Image (cartoon, rainbow, N blue to C red):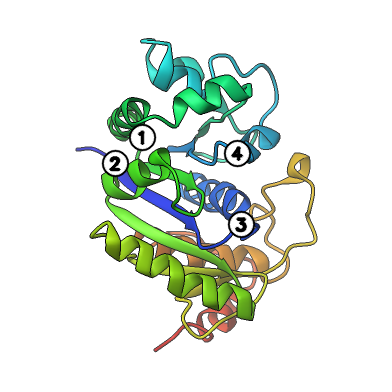
Amino acid sequence: MPGTTTALVGATGGAGTTRTAVELAAMLARDGRDVAVLDAAYATQGLSHYVSGRIDPDLTTLVTESAEPLDAGLVDLDVDTSGRVACCPVSAPFERLARAKTADAAQRFEERVAEAAQRFDHVLVDTPPVAANQAVAAVTSVDRVVLVTPGTRHGADALQQMRGRLRDLDVTAAATLSTRGAIDDADATVPASDVTEPDDAPACLADSGEFAPAVAVATEVAVDEQLAIEFDDEGLRETVESYLPE
């Protein structure tokens, strides 16, 4: 049975979608699940900052030039978990980025998502605000679309605009996550973390503080499944869950 595919879509630039994808993937791996993270945020190429080693081929190569299997472009995230986090980042020159945004390349992007679903329990797609072919491919080919927005007035406004754009594509967001602050429309909140550098992330593997329990709740909301994870202080998780909408 194919794994669950979820597009994490930034409602606006700077929403923290890439970091959220990394944290949710690590939490799923902590629960013993194998997760693939695919990078549709071609402009920022942010996922590449979270992995080490050579990125060749990158995802844009796999949707424009290469018939190699997806495995050729996967780079494992360095996490001490029972499950695996394998990332397929983007690291490309402008010329290839342009070719990767064509309609034909977007169709191959959909095929890569489907390929990942055959091998992993979960596929998370780091998706920018929907304004290019690969983002459209992401939101129209996955099982679930989850919006990620900063917990600010600007984030709340951008959220409504992005929901309208999704409706134009006949897509409905299954859930909304807010970052760095709560908003009324969010189904869960990923708070700010003291860990800010990509080299030090993910931060959700540490039990201290409220960050890990909050990420666990956000993960359950995003993939619509329960995790079998216990924290040193279960009261923290109960506190985090108390902030969820009724």
N-terminal of the two: label 2 or label 3?
Answer: 2
Image: 32 above or below 9:
above
* Quarter holding residue 47: top right
* Quarter holding residue 78: top right
Looking at the rendered structure, the secondary structure element under dot 2 is loop
| Residue name at image x 45 percent, y 70 percent | 161
Residue 131 in percent (x, y) is at: 45, 50
Looking at the rendered structure, the secondary structure element under dot 1 is loop
Closer to viewer: mark 2 or mark 4: 4
Q: Which residue is mark 4?
A: 43
N-terminal of the two: label 1 or label 3?
Answer: 3
N-terminal of the two: label 1 or label 2?
Answer: 2
N-terminal of the two: label 1 or label 4?
Answer: 4
Q: Residues within 10 Å of mark 4 (few under 14, many from 20)?
A: few
Residue farthest bottom in this picture: 246
| Residue name at image x 53 percent, y 15 percent | 57
Q: Which residue is mark 3?
A: 13
